[in-house]
Amino acid sequence: MSSLQVCGSCGATLGLLEPAMECGCGGLLDLRHDPPAEDGRSLRRLFAARMASAAPCDRSGVWRYRELVLPGVEHDVVSHPEGNTPLLQREGVSRWTGLDHLLLKHEGHNPTGSFKDRGMTVGVTQARRLAVTALACASTGNTSASLAAYGAQAALPVLVVVPAGKVAFGKLGQSLAYGARTVMVRGDFDACLRLVREASARLGVYLLNSVNPFRIQGQKTIMFELLEQLGWEAPDWVVVPAGNLGNTAAFGMALVEAHRLGLTDRVPRLAAVQAEGASPFAAGFAEGFARRRKVAAETVATAIRIGDPASWDRAVRSIRDTDGVVTAVTDAEILEAKAVVDGSGAGCEPASAAAVAGARQLRQRGVMARDDRVVAVLTGHILKDPEVLLEYHRETDPPRPRQNPPVEIEPTLADLERVLHIV
Ligand SMILES: *Cc1c(COP(=O)(O)O)cnc(C)c1O
Ligand SMILES: [Zn+2]
């Protein structure tokens, strides 16, 4: 069984152990594996059997699908383990979106609290096979939290580059605590990524942003695991928040692959949702992807505060291959969706709520039908961004939808009674 790296733009091929992050033509690389020997039915049985195994590689929600991720690597994986995230049904969220069959795939249940761990376990495993001496990434926060943890596990030094003042506290704290060298740049994420791409080429540190094709392979397993949880019956729609477009790219690849291998009998439609202030891809979709767009990004959802998405071309392929759509939602809609998801007991970070706000909007526009089976991917954990949470529930006039401000009292029964009255 073997794999190659293939340029998505010109089709040139590179060996699996070439550390290059891009082709000579500037295109991004994708991995292409020899198709597995097993047919769809045998693969489904193999994946299911591994859930009952005690081997670490089988227990990971990423490496359980290793034939489709990085074949031939079984020993020596850097795994927490990750994945195995729940698929939730929440009545209040369904009602708010107007979708009767809405499920939430909660990737915030990964070891560092976001889906980034799924790609990172593969990227850092590959880094160790290449015997690199240091790891680096630019990040809006979750990539750095994840890389810091997996780098620590692999005993490799980690450099993370983040936009100063634009990273949620939970994420910044994780990066420091896991021991990454953390550099705050006076600039936005796009500037950070440009800087670290130059540095990796010049200084020989291994880059673990989603331009890295090994990360994309790991992120495909969000879709494999979702399909398996649904008994390999594809839903009608998968909705995902979209920033740098790594997930949008990975999901399209995985859904097409699952169909081609006979794991599922059809391909769901992908809906990528951006924040209005950071929506170059939605603007591109509206004009048939006639040209690549960039914007200066601004949104409360810092994980998708990205103006020049790196995986643009891969993501265009995903939208076309899945008959997908791209849309944008306002920050107010994101915050309301978050309050609904949080209030359901599921909870998520702001960027994740964009998927739920997007599902509601697509239902209202009639793009989705009330009885469509829809899965929204919640990409990160509620505790990632405590500032946005506390700010939202602070007392304001007029109050925000579902606002729940804390109440301060004297330590007397009379005070407590008065408060209970208004509950
Ligand atoms: C990274 C991230 C995103 C954006 O994913 P892309 O693959 O960059 O489009 C969305 N939500 C959360 C919580 C993230 O950490
Ligand atoms: Zn090329």
Image (cartoon, grey):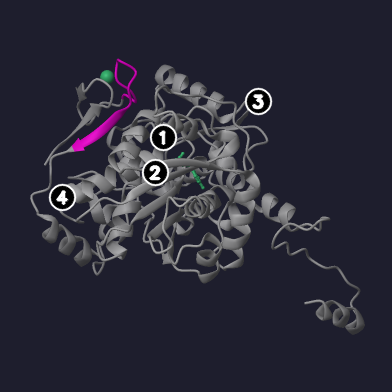
Above or below: residue 378 compared with residue 119: below
State the SS at label 4: loop
Q: Looking at this view, is 70 or 359 the one in front?
A: 359
Tell which circle, 4 or 2, labels the residue nearer the N-terminal end.
2
Dividing the picture into quadrants, the one containing residue 399 is bottom right
- Tell me the kind of residue under disc 4: Leu
Determine the main secondary structure of the stretch shown in magenta: loop
Q: Is residue 404 left or right of residue 285?
A: right
The residue that mark 2 highlights is 120
Residue 261: assigned label = 4
Tell which circle, 4 or 1, labels the residue nearer the N-terminal end.
1
Is label 3 in contact with label 4 (beta carbons under 8 Å)?
no
Q: Residue at 21% x, 61% y: name it.
A: 47
Q: Residue at 16% x, 64% y: name it.
A: 45
Q: CA distance from mark 2 to mark 1?
A: 7 Å
- Tell me the kind of residue under disc 3: Arg
Residue 186: assigned label = 3
Residue 105 lies within the magenta run: no
Residue 208: assigned label = 1
State the SS at label 1: loop
Q: Looking at this view, is 422 or 189 the one in front?
A: 422
